[in-house]
Amino acid sequence: MKKLLTIIVLALGVPFAHAQEGTFKKHYLNHTEVGIMLGRVKYDPYAGQGGTSQNISENRTNLTLQLFNGIQYTSRLGLGIITGLDWYNSALVNPVGLGLRYDLAGKKNTRLYASADAGYGFTWFHQNSDGFDTQGGLMLNPGLGLRVGKPNGAAFTLSFSYKHQDVTVDKPLFVDQTSRVEDRNYNRLLVRMGISF
């Protein structure tokens, strides 16, 4: 985790060391994406109920939607705020945070870019079952993508990223229990398509 945060801080600092290009003007930047989250989970459906433990592993495929709104600070660097919706099997999470988009390489109309998003996942729209209380937590989402289109105009994007999302669930108590809290760590591979302008 510390290594990832160090990389993000360095990535934010490197672009500012370069001189700005002569004719570039800062402008509004939007990046809207929709995609899927892929992962594999291991859980014990009988945890906390006594008896034997029985771990079950399952593949998960979920939907994700994200909006990035900010400023194209240089010809290569965009900084902004991200919001979105992530539908996990047992939680609806609304990530809110800071985002970075940085063009790494490429020709004029096709560019490879890096993204780094960090923030907090809220559970504003999640509907809890009776006796349950779901709360969000830390969200980290670094990735790489391909942007195809004019540098200062609309472009289509395809991105691949890793997403870490913390969630805490307070569950109803069984007999003789004083606390029943489940800490969930969602770790997913995201494949998203979108448009930026």
Image: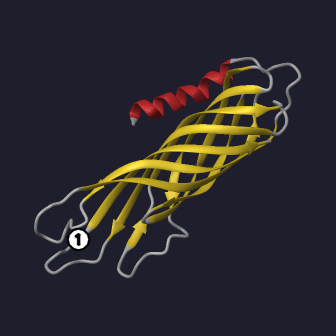
Which residue is at 21% across, 65% downward?
47
Residue 4 against residue 39 in the figure, above or below: above
Which residue is at the front of the view, 61 or 188? 61
Which residue is at 76% across, 28% downward?
74
Residue 139 against residue 156 in the figure, above or below: below
Q: What's the residue type where badge 1 is placed? A: Ser
Picture quadrant where residue 151 is located: top right
Where residue 27 appears, as percent x and y from the top left, is 83, 38
Residue under pointer 1: 179
Which residue is at the front of the view, 26 or 152? 152
Which residue is at the front of the view, 136 or 192? 192
Q: Is residue 63 left or right of residue 28?
A: left
Q: Is residue 141 left or right of residue 132?
A: right
Residue 130 against residue 163 in the figure, above or below: below
Could you say whether the residue bearing mark 1 is in a helix, strand or loop? loop
Picture quadrant where residue 24 is located: top right
Extreme residue toward the right, this view: 23
Picture quadrant where residue 23 is located: top right
Within 10 Å of the Cα at label 1, are there few (<14), some (14-19), or many (20+) other Cα atoms?
few
Where residue 187 appears, as percent x and y from the top left, is 41, 47
